[in-house]
Image (spheres, rainbow, N blue to C red):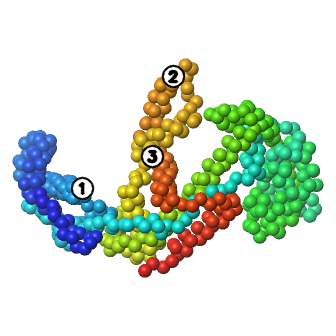
Amino acid sequence: MNVTRENLSDLELCIKVEVAAADYAENVTKQLKRYRQQATVPGFRKGMAPMGMIERMYKPSLTAEEVNNILSQNLYKYIDDEKLEIIGSPLANEEQTGSPDFNHPTDYVFYFDAALMPKVEIDWSKIDTKLLQIKVPAKEIDSQIEDIRKRYGKFETPEEIGENDHVYGKAVELGKDGKEKEGGVSVFLSFEVQDVKDPDIKQSIIGKKNEEKVVFNAFKAFGSAFIEKNFRMEAAAAKKFKSDIEFTVSGCSRITPHEIDEELFAQVFPNDDIKDEAKFRKAVQKEIEKANDEQCRILFVNQVRRQLLDNFNAEMPEKFLKRWILSRDDKDLTAEKLDAEWGEKYLPALKWEILDGALNKIKSIEPTHNDIVDYVKDILKRNDRNAEEGESAEAKEERIEKAAQSIASDRNNVSQIVDRLYADKTFELFKEQVKPEVEKVTAKEFGERVKEDNAKNAKNEAAPTE
């Protein structure tokens, strides 16, 4: 067994693997003897067929299998031993290798083409982006608290509709004669009384009971957007819909918001010792800020990623990479389609794979098993409802540790966690390297920045490649 390589260029190489007959002959002979013992051949007792017959039947396939096993093991062992950072995977060079004749075992020589990972030097000084921080106005905290009060409030189904109730029932379109229009709209509606725009219509709905009817103009009550969505109409048709509808009440529901008290504080933040409204507001504000920060981190990472790709200037072994992509089992991909999508789809993905490798050399951003376990443990602790009476802290920790290890052992169960941890680690690395200036913006300004960023991404994707 001998493995050597020839450097064809700075990035491309040919790996030569020589497999001598002595490397595989002994294992093939053992396999043939085992086959002979187990083979049932017509005209011979089991295990008594002539070895020559067994060899003619099985030796070529056994030789091919054994040679391929040795070939694969030693090819990748050589890559590991030589610390070759290859991109993609080695491709058989059939032109140089030819067609091995396994019917007449001999010494074999195989050739593989491969490409090295381009060397990337990241110049962080070229990354120019800020880390945004969204301001939280008092009215947003007020709105969030009202939502919380409703979420933990008292649910009722009153007999009569009130001004703050949610109403549902059947609506049918009426003709000019005040009767149900043949072929007209007939839908089930669900809406908030507070969302009714016309005060007179709103008042006509309040006080109605189940099975009672009320007639009103849908356009005046809700507007075209509501009609388009709930009446299943095109936008143009919704704007022209001026008919009255007859609404038959099926029922209503009412939520009485929870009082702002210690009971609410404990339900919303069970792990915090909150005793007054001021601290409650502060806790709600932190939750809003946490959600906002998540969006700001995503934008920051996307902006840095795009700039890293924009500044990527390493040479790429494109000819090899195209051949490697076409070699994969994708029957729908042709050379023509690959060329058409190369600059927009495939090249950026390959560049990011290379950048990802370079980033991991600075600091590992690939989530480890322990990272996943710790993340799952944190979730289990915050939502633990299985504690037994008298359970010690040690027993609880052991129980949660065991559950977390079980969950984390199946990557299919934690794929979203892996993505989240990867994103978090990427953000921390970018933040350390870029050291961005923090800029506080309003929610509206943040939305505008996101639109600008999306426009830049779209422009880059649409730009022609050289």
Labels 3 and 1: the sequence-earlier one: 1
Q: How many marks?
A: 3
> Which amino acid lies under the numbered mark 2 shown in the image of this protein?
Ser
Between 461 and 109, the residue placed more toward the observer is 461
Determine crowd level at label 3: few under 14, some 14-19, many 20+ residues with C-alpha closer than 10 A.
Answer: few
Instruction: Report which quarter residue 266 is drawn in.
Output: top right
> Which amino acid lies under the numbered mark 3 shown in the image of this protein?
Asn
Marks 3, 2: nearer the viewer? 2
CA separation, marks 3 and 2?
32 Å
| Res 221 seen here | yes
Labels 3 and 2: the sequence-earlier one: 2
**Which residue is label 2 attached to?**
392
CA separation, marks 1 and 2?
48 Å
| Res 151 seen here | no
Q: Quadrant of the C terminus?
A: bottom left
Query: Residue at horizontal 40%, vertical 54%?
Result: 363
Determine crowd level at label 1: few under 14, some 14-19, many 20+ residues with C-alpha closer than 10 A.
Answer: few
